[in-house]
Amino acid sequence: MLDHFAADRLERLALTAEAYVAQVFGMNLRLHDLAGEGLPYFLTDRYHFWRGDLQGRPAVFMVNRAGPLDTFDIAKHRELARRHLGVALVVLVLERVDARVRRRLIEHRIAFLAPGAQIYVPEALLDLREGAPAKIAPQPDYLSPTAQSVVLGAMLGRFVDQQSLTDLAERFQVSVMSMSRALDELVAIGVAEALWAGRRRRLRFAVNGRDLWNTIEPRLKSPVRKLRLVRGQIPLDQAPLAGETALAHYTMLSPPRVERRAVLASRWTGMTQALELEPAWTDEADRIELETWSYDPLVLAEDGVVDRLSLYLSIRREPDERVAQAAAQMLEDMAW
């Protein structure tokens, strides 16, 4: 068991490592204490371990807390940790590093992170020193589904701005890693920035409202992947109204004869089985048109209807003039 001083020192080291890599190189380590998880006692006695993330790959970070070790021992212990934990990237964290130690670690291709000095991970082709230009993510032509749902949530006033990635991941029902990549996309195109509050990374938009929409719209895609025809009963809390059915809810457009709904694509199979939905033909009067989406329509839906902006994106290229005019009017009526 660590005494208070040791625990405090390790906490400071973790914070310093995260802040250094984020500020200088634009990467988020997301360090979390790692339990023993079957590691040999002599390893947990000599090292403290964190789980984290490095360029989107799972990694383990280890810091020596039991006196000096030579390069041979460090290499052997890293390999043991890699085998026991099933992680390819194991990085030694150093509170300080002199030129001699740095040279020996690099000669033996031992990955290390020295806050304020360097991060060297040969397995990831990573050798960055302070003063070297940080890698900047390229601007995407189109946003990923996660990034798109987040930016739409911001414009819809869903309390997205200034939230931590952990909170956003829970709200949008995605992994923290997916949310981190979404933030990187938004930062790359210049509409948001990443902030740090303690050990939590937060999202802050640089533009908002209609200005954000005008900036981001060319990079947004229809969330609809496929359209399926089914028979059966579907609760609104599982598949909200979509398409012309939703547009009729928001505008004066007459509702279509066939109801249309939306569901996250990955939930389609499970929902079909749970609700015992059956395939339908195009001429069946009781059919339901079911859109499968690239992101969860329920996250931004209100009162059983998909949100206005996702709806607009799904029908903005509709050839039916009445639908196009209603969609344009819906957008004009938005309270930005």
Image: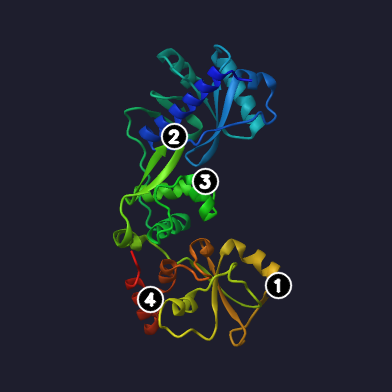
Residue positioned 58% across, 84% down in the render:
282
Q: Which mark is residue 198?
A: 2
Residue positioned 37% across, 79% down in the render:
326
User: Where in the figure is residue 112, as x and y percent of width and height?
Assistant: 48, 25
Label 1 is placed on what type of residue?
Glu
Q: Is residue 201 above or below residue 289?
A: above
Crowding at mark 1 (Cα within 10 Å: few <14, some 14-19, many 20+): few
Label 3 is placed on what type of residue?
Val
Q: Is residue 175 above or below residue 7?
A: below
Check the picture and name the quadrant holding the C terminus. Answer: bottom left
Q: Which mark is residue 176?
A: 3
Q: Which of pointers 1 and 2 indicates the residue nearer the eye?
A: 2
- Marks 4 and 1: in contact by CB < 8 Å? no
Q: Whole-Å distance between the Cαs marked 4 and 3?
A: 33 Å
Nearest to N terminus: mark 4 or mark 3:
3
Callout 4: SS: helix
Crowding at mark 2 (Cα within 10 Å: few <14, some 14-19, many 20+): few
Nearest to N terminus: mark 2 or mark 4:
2
| Residue on which disc 1 sits | 276
User: Where in the figure is residue 86, as x and y percent of width and height?
Assistant: 64, 35
User: Where in the figure is residue 306, as x and y percent of width and height?
Assistant: 49, 69
Label 2 is placed on what type of residue?
Gly
Label 4 is placed on what type of residue?
Ala
Nearest to N terminus: mark 1 or mark 3:
3
Q: Whole-Å distance between the Cαs marked 1 and 4?
A: 33 Å
